[in-house]
Amino acid sequence: MTTTTPLRVRTDIDGVRHDRAAVLGWELERGRAALRLLKQRLGDDLTRALLAPDTAAADAAMAGWLRASGGRWRAAVTELTATGIDAATFLAWWQGRLHAPDRAALLAANPEHYLADSTGDTVEIVETVGGGPLRFFLRFHPTPATPRYPVRIGGTGHLADGSEALRVMHEFADSPEGLRIRLTVEFPAAAPAELSTGHQWHFACEFANWLEAAAGEAP
């Protein structure tokens, strides 16, 4: 027998009523804890091995998009504004985590961060780009400031064979509205649009989580 009554779930714990959003919030926190534990137990070597078929397929796909793009790139931008923290505080925390390196903090920012090894001058990263994990090596380089963004950090990501796979530009400025962050990623122009749109949300997730972590540790 079918019914048109919409599903509603009520939760009562020790006499306190909780709505669905509260249960989903609990689920999110426990999901993060479960992912954190699994990533810690796996470690970098096993993670590379487990995801090798995925990253090999991503390498092949990226090589094709690079050839088809003929040197053309497509940019996508995500912008955040945060109050309660300034650029200097956030950058000191974030760059400190990279230089430490603090693997736990780097992986925790996004559920699709699988590996982040920043022990050298180049950050080895395995994260979802488009439909699956991509392994690339990101090197940041000094970038001139602009009047709008006093701090700009550019970077280039390469595949294991040295092919350029992506470009990023992270820009930071304090304003009366709060800390402004502009995050740009460029992929080969022939790559599917989901790489760009997916990474816009990827940026939004990871930097919001890093901002919360930095603010939580600020004196």
Image (cartoon, rainbow, N blue to C red):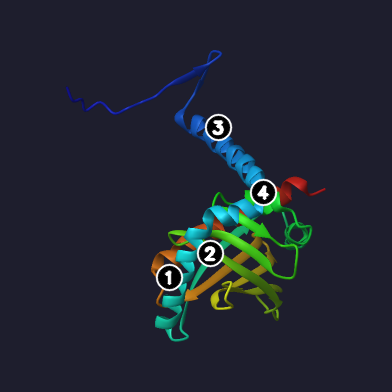
**In the rendered image, which residue does mark 2 sit on?**
78
Q: Between label 4 and label 1, give the one nearer the viewer.
A: 1
List x then y, in percent, for residue 171.
64, 70
For marks 4 and 1, give the CA distance.
35 Å
Mark yes or no: residue 200 visible. no
- Neighbours of disc 3 within 10 Å: few (<14), some (14-19), many (20+): few
Between discs 4 and 3, the one toward the N terminus: 3
Q: Which residue is mark 1?
A: 61
Look at label 4 and name its amino acid.
Answer: Glu
Mark 1 lies on a secondary structure that is helix
Which element is circle 2 on? strand
Disc 4 versus disc 2: distance between alpha carbons? Answer: 17 Å
Q: CA distance from mark 3 to mark 1?
A: 38 Å
The image quadrant of residue 192 is bottom left
* Residue type at numbered disc 1: Ala
User: Which element type, helix, strand or loop, lies under badge 4?
Assistant: helix
Callouts 1 and 2 close, C-beta under 8 Å: no
Label 4 sits on residue: 212
User: Where is 39 relative to 169, above or below?
Assistant: above
96 horizontally vs 132: left or right: right
Query: In this orientation, which residue lies closer to the viewer: 63 or 107?
Result: 63
**Label pair 4/3, CB-CB below 8 angstroms:** no
In the image, 184 versus 156, the foreground residue is 156
In front of the other: label 3 or label 1? Answer: 1
Q: Position of residue 197 (x, y in %)?
A: 44, 63
Q: CA distance from mark 3 to mark 2?
A: 28 Å
Q: Picture coordinates of residue 54 (x, y %)?
A: 48, 59
Residue 26: mark in rendering: 3
